[in-house]
Image (cartoon, helix red, strand yellow):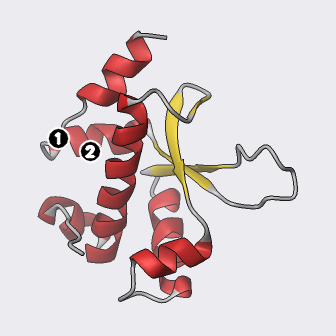
C-alpha cells in the first residue's frame, strides 16, 4: 500500500498529519464526487479505530488519534457523529474551510467538493 503527503503541509503540521490529511482528502473527495455523506454542508468520512490502525500500520492507535486531534486543534479538520445508531461512537471527519483552502493552495483538486455542493 502507498501513502502520500504534501511536503508543504508536512513542514507546517508534521509528516503524519500530512499523511492522515491526504487520506481524509482522498475519501472525502470520493464521497463528494458521489454526493455521499453530506451533512451540515460538508462531506465526511468515517472509520473505526481498528480500521485506521489497519490502514496506518506504522502508527499505533494512540499516535493516529493524537495526529487526528492535532489536525482538529489546528482547525484543519472537523469531528462529528452522524451515526444512525446513537450507541455507535464512530467519529466522522470533514475538512474545514481552513483545511480546504490549505489543500487548494497546495495544488489539490477541489472540483468534487465545490461542484457537488453547487448541485444541492
Residue 116 is left or right of residue 15, and the answer is right
- Residue 52: where, in percent of width, then height? 49, 73
Residue displayed at 23% across by 70% down? 3
Q: Residue visible at 39% across and 86% down?
A: 57
Residue at disc 2, secondary structure: helix
- What is the residue that sits farthest to the top in this orientation? 119
Q: Judge left or right: residue 42 versus residue 76.
A: right
The crowding category of the residue bearing disc 2, from other C-alpha atoms within 10 Å (few below 14, some 14 to 19, many at least 20), is some
The circle drawn on residue 105 is 1
108 versus 58 height, above or below = above
In the image, is residue 56 above or below residue 99?
below
Task: Confirm whether residue 63 shows in the render.
Answer: yes
Residue that appears at 13% across and 65% down: 7
Name the residue nearer the viewer: 11 or 77. Answer: 77
The percent position of residue 4, horizontal first and vertical second, equals 20, 66
Q: Residue at x 74, y 47 (%)?
A: 83
Mark sitting on residue 102: 2
**What is the secondary structure assignment of the residue under circle 1?**
helix
Measured as percent of width and height from the top left, residue 1 is found at 24, 75
In this picture, is 96 found above or below 113? Answer: below
Q: Nearer the viewer, residue 2 or 108?
A: 2
Of all residues, the one furthest to the right in this rendering is: 87
The picture places residue 81, in percent across and down from the top left corner, at 70, 48
Viewer-closest of 73 and 91: 91
Residue 98 visible within the image: no
Q: Do tag 2 and tag 1 residues touch (Cβ < 8 Å)?
A: yes
Residues at marks 2 and 1, CA–CA distance in whole angstroms: 5 Å
Up the image or down, 83 lies above or below 18; here it is: above
Amino acid at each position: 500500500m502507498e501513502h502520500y503527503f504534501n511536503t508543504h503541509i508536512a513542514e507546517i503540521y508534521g509528516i503524519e498529519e500530512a499523511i492522515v490529511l491526504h487520506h481524509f482528502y482522498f475519501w472525502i473527495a470520493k464521497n463528494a464526487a458521489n454526493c455521499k455523506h453530506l451533512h451540515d454542508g460538508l462531506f465526511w468520512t468515517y472509520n473505526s479505530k481498528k480500521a485506521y490502525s489497519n490502514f496506518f500500520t506504522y502508527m499505533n492507535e494512540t499516535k493516529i488519534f493524537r495526529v487526528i486531534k492535532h489536525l482538529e486543534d489546528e482547525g484543519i479538520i472537523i469531528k462529528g457523529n452522524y451515526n444512525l445508531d446513537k450507541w455507535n461512537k464512530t467519529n466522522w471527519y470533514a475538512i474545514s474551510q481552513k483545511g480546504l483552502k490549505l489543500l487548494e493552495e497546495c495544488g489539490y483538486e477541489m472540483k468534487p467538493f465545490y461542484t457537488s455542493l453547487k448541485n444541492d
